Amino acid sequence: ALLILALAVSFLVYRLGSLIGKAGRILDETQASLKVTTDNVQPTLVKLTDTVSLTNDQLARVDSITANVGSMATNANALTSLFAATVGQPLVKAAAFSYGVRSALAKPAGGRLPQQDES
């Protein structure tokens, strides 16, 4: 009976040892896989950092362009107001004067417009 018990314990120890060996190989494979993944991710992160840096540079340029466009719009608005103030009022006065002259020249010498027949 002790021999059977010793064989059973030996078999269990053997099976347990093989399970521990398989677990060790799994851990070794996991470690190798993790190393490969780390080696592949590091260059990707470096490239990503470069891309983000270049993107930030481009955004700074776009911000500068946007500020310049805003300044141009403000200047165009001021120029339009200046043009309306300096040219608009004299044009209105000239138009009113020419209308008055045309109206005065269109009247007959008596100062009255001929009346139309109401037939």
Image (cartoon, rainbow, N blue to C red):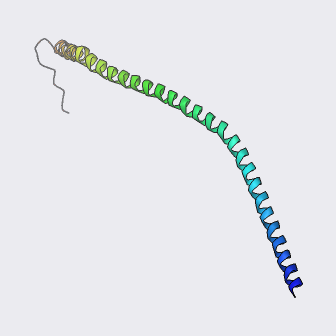
> Among all residues in the image, which is located at the extreme bottom?
1
Residue shown at 30% from the left, 20% from the top: 80
Q: Is residue 6 above or below residue 52?
A: below
Q: Position of residue 22 (x, y in %)?
A: 80, 62
Q: Quadrant of residue 66?
A: top left
Which picture quadrant has residue 95? top left
Residue drawn at x 21%, y 17% as measured from the top left: 89
- Lateral position of residue 111 relative to residue 10, left or right: left
Q: Which quarter of the image is occupied by the C terminus?
A: top left
Out of 101 and 74, give the one closest to the viewer.
74
Q: Position of residue 51 (x, y in %)?
A: 58, 33
3 left or right of 72? right
Could you tell whether 51 is left or right of 14 in the image? Answer: left
Give 69 or 11, whichever is nearer the viewer: 11
**Viewer-closest of 57 and 15:** 15
Q: Looking at the picture, how far across and down is residue 20, in whole percent? A: 77, 65
